[in-house]
Amino acid sequence: MTGYDVAIESLPMQAVIDLKGEAAALAGWCGDVLPQFPARPNSLTRASGRALLHIGPGHWLLCADLADEDSLIAALRPDAAPPQVSVVPVSDSLAHFAVTGPDAAEVMAVATPLDLHPTVFAEDAASFTEAFGLRALVRRHPGGFALSVDRSFAPMILQALSLSAG
Amino acid sequence: MGGNGWRLAEGGRIDRSRPLRFRFDGRDHVGFHGDTLASALLANGVRLSARSFKYHRPRGIMGAGVEEPATLVHLAGELASGNRPATTLRLSDGLEAWPVNAWPSARLDIGAVNQMIARLIPAGFYYKTFKWPDWHLYEPAIRRAAGLAPAPATPPDGAWEARHAHADILIAGAGPAGLMAALVAGRAGARVILADEGIEAGGSLLTRRLSIAGAPALDWVTAAVAELAALPNVMHLQDAAVWACREHNLVMVEERAPSRPAILGRSWRVRAGRVITATGAIERLMVFEGNDQPGVMLASAAQAYVNRWAVRPGRRAVVFTNNDSAYAAAADLARAGVEVAAIVDSRDPVPEHARAASAGLPVLAGHVVRSTQGGRALRAVTVAPLAGGGARRIDCDLLAVSGGWSPAVHLYSQSRAPIAWDDRLAAFLPAGPAGPVAAAGAADGALELGVALADGAAKARAALADLGFAPPDAALPEAEDLPYGITPLWTVPGAGAKAFLDIQNDVTVADIELALREGYSSIEHVKRYTTGGMGLDQGKTGNVNIIGAVAERLGKTPGEVGVTTFRPPWTPVEFGAIAGRRSGPVVLPYRHTPLTDWHMDQGAVIYEAGARWRRPGYYPRLGEAFQDTVNREARTVREGVGIYDGAPLGKYEIKGRDAARFLDWIYTNVFSSLTVGNGRYGLMLTDDGLILDDGVSFRLAEDRFVMSTSTGNADAVGQHMEKLLQIERPDWQVMITNVTSQWANATICGPKARAVLQAMGTDIDMSPAAFPFMSVRDGRVAGLPARVARVSFTGELSFEVNVRPRDLPALWAAAMTAGAPFGITPIGSEANHVLRVEKGFLSLGHEVDGTADPHDLGMSWVMAAAKPDFIGKRSVDLRRASGRPRRELVGFRPLDPDRQVPEGAPLTPGGRTEATEGFVTACVWSVVEGRWLGLALLQDGRARIGTRAHVRLPGGVIEVELCPPVFHDPKGERLRS
Amino acid sequence: MLVLDCPFCGPRNESEFAYGGPALAPRPADPSAVSDADWVDWLTVPPNPMGEVEERWWHLRGCGAWLTVRRHTVTHAVTEVRLGR
């Protein structure tokens, strides 16, 4: 009764700021707090421990260690942002999991219909998709993949991933 | 087993050093590794192995693969499962199998009495006989008598997996064409999935004696499989049936013996750029009286048994054919030591190349087999000239029949690609223009090996070119094969009530003729009336014969008669494999609040309450009955203070220049006039004038609001708002962020709520003047950053203390500690329901059921008359203008205060058996009145307040008195206190 | 399961999307100026041919965009996917 050679790990909460608006307006308000804007949809850029994910039209997520949350909020001043820019801290909204190991792709294939082949899902890819019927963010992670879902679903996703790992 | 002469001393793809013991129909046998259950049964001399579905006629093994129509078995023990063709079951040690439709055994079958009344139960018998008064009276007994295998009583020990996969090119079938296609596609570097339902690759090459490039064809198969295994871009699955080819090239594969041992089976959902169906061809039966007897077998199956499994399926054979391929089968039987008494060919003349292929075997050209003799085993056949004339008897224990070949166009046709009748091959062939799904090899009508290999390569090259790959130089191996020719003979003259077209469902020529006589001339109707082609085998060996027989009788061509629709699955699939891991605890998603564990530790009864949240229904104390718990919790809120986990409440942040304008548009009332820091209750309609949701929105800044929605409708509201913005108002600047899981609230409610908050410690001025009803304040509560809203869904003084979910457990603990002196008590959704019904607050799914509009609910006050437009206004106005009576919200009290009324119960005029005039939307035991009371939607209800109405139930009528739909604090003084 | 080629995300499985109904004409700017019959027609009488239809899909488990999709009701062939209307 062997399962897949994979580790399922619950990752700590991250600082996540939801950013909406035109890129130029966001750049103007956020200044150099953000990494460079990603050039392609569903890709991310990194700088000084922060990642900027382009997850939808006029929609980005800024991710960093939770320790960086207060400084990010202080710098981005969500309550003072001008009308054309939406800055909303959403760190608590996402729960993150790492699926790593030689068989990580096998378990991910059970979870999601997204094609994660290296020729399709690049090193800097970051996209929302469907996993176990839920909206889920998929990124590459050292040794495998990171999967993020609405935190309320965390116990269910952990159970589903563990069952899938066998 | 040895010495009975059925098993050849050498040859075949079996391992004689690995015997396997098995049990069939209550008797012990031995086979070899490499056997199927069918080949092992034949090697043990078992000829009677099944009883037919309807008449319980004795049947044997007729095929050698998925086409098998006769011998279905169910497995006992660890492998328990039903209705498996014996020809596809890989033999394993200790296997225990039983025929599916025989009791107590196939040899002594009680149901065989049906044969004697066969002429009384023709096609349509059930439709005609059991329709009065009600089919359901008869169904259970008929299901038992005519059934197939029972479902296993317990779930199997183990799990299935369903997974997704992606391929540039998926190839169904690893016969010559499929392997050739896989080699070409694999060498070009495309991502290839090759899936084949057989235990090993090779397809027809496993069962025929052919050569490729001057060597045995199986050497070429071995080399091809090895080359594919070495290509990292190719995944090759065996024992993996491609069972569906659906829209946009979604291909379903069931892998039955995955290499990972913990899995019972695996279902692949493959999304492929191009699909090549190299699914081979299926031999047809010949149709004559007694063509279903044990000992009658497809010629290709007989050939497979001698070549692949080294089993003689008989000692003395007659071959009956209308085409060339059976001559090679006859030659192989003779080579294996089976005496071939005659090749009976309905054609005259017989092509020279066919005679040459079976040199020396006697051929009866222009002859047919009219009937068979023998009961449980074939003893002889009656042969006569097709044109009529003297019949003669030929003794034999094997009749190998070939009615020609039907390319397996099933997957191709499932993809909606067209097929068309081909006179030369007497078969339906793929006929579509080049598209994302292509057939190759025998499935494409390339029935000769060399042509099949070339076709496989060509289809792969075309797919590669479509996808932008450079096709490699194809080195096509040389191959020789017997040319194929056929002159169809759909039914032998004299074929009638014992000439079977569909072996599995016992459909005869006489049944087809009856259907035609009764006017069922469309092939789809013939199928449904006779059940021909509706068995587990989906008529693989019989459907084209049915079409041919119908065409013959209607004076049409088979092409004019047409085919029935090919639908998935190609072969039966385990339900478990489709579900995969999404079963048991994770069959549906579920959601936890940050406090779900706490609630469970408290012994709360947890259930799903909207949008998949697991929430506390009530918190019973030791020995406390359900109603006592709910009463205690509700009373606590009315008299003291309760605390409720409000984390699941839907919340959206709405930001942008046009945010206020947007809310004015989607709510029935006005939000642009709201001042910062204050909130307003709003009702949201869809443009059909019905209620989508309600909730309170607060203005955080000129350009920024936070909206709350009901828990169950949070996603629907998000969808509604985004659609309106992106589709109807792309020029408006509004940005919406779902913050449902970013703000979690503990709702502290009851007359002592303010005191509890003060005891917890807060920097917010809690005085009623500084913090009035329907306002929101940011600050700290119990040292935690919080946004506190004064709203109430219970009718009492109430504060929703919103914090980050990570802080909610700490906030909750602080409230429980600080609230202890005030008797704070956690309350569940049951008590919440009581409290809101006492106040007459509407609830989605209860009073808002998809038919009610705001006026019906007595909420005309929320319909801003001054606004020229809002979503839903036009349809409400239109419906109101009709003047037709509406069902309106009322309260009621049963005349008997102790009488509970079921929620959903209908109200009828005077309690009579008439059309309903409304229904009960809610009924609770009220703690303020000490009796049952409730709410209802009732026709013209408001005008009837003060009168009585009647709830009609199966057991009697409950009389209720109608009243305004509010039972507690009608002026709302308590919630504003 | 269809594949819809989202202009932002590329081809994605149907399970990422929610069907959002037929693609109605733009909502009348002033519904009160529209006759009852025209209003009902706009709201409830979308074309349903054996052929191409335009319909809305929401990429709710992907990028969040509302899309207009032109799909053949017999073959499922999708000939156009665009952002918004």
Image (cartoon, rainbow, N blue to C red):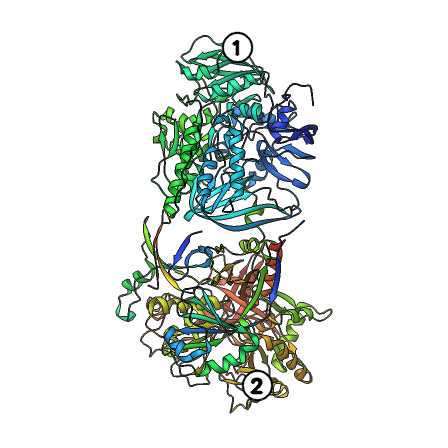
Asked whether, in this view, residue B905 is left or right of residue B691, the answer is right
Q: Where residue B393 is drawn, which disc sits there?
A: 1
Check disc 2 and report the residue beneath it: B780
Q: Residue at x 33, y 79 (%)?
A: B866
Instruction: Identify the image quadrant of the C terminus of chain B.
Output: bottom right
Nearer the observer, A4 or B81:
A4
| Residue B617 placement (x, y as % from top left) | 62, 68
Using the image, name the chain to which the residue with label 2 belongs: B
| Residue B681 placement (x, y as % from top left) | 45, 78
Nearer the observer, B680 or B72:
B72
In the image, residue B416 sits, relative to residue B292, either above or below, namely: below
In the image, residue C4 sits, relative to residue B786, either above or below, namely: above
Asked whether, in this view, residue B692 is left or right of residue B34, the answer is left
**Mark 1 secondary-structure assignment:** strand
Amino acid at dot 2: Arg
| N-terminal label among 2 and 1 | 1
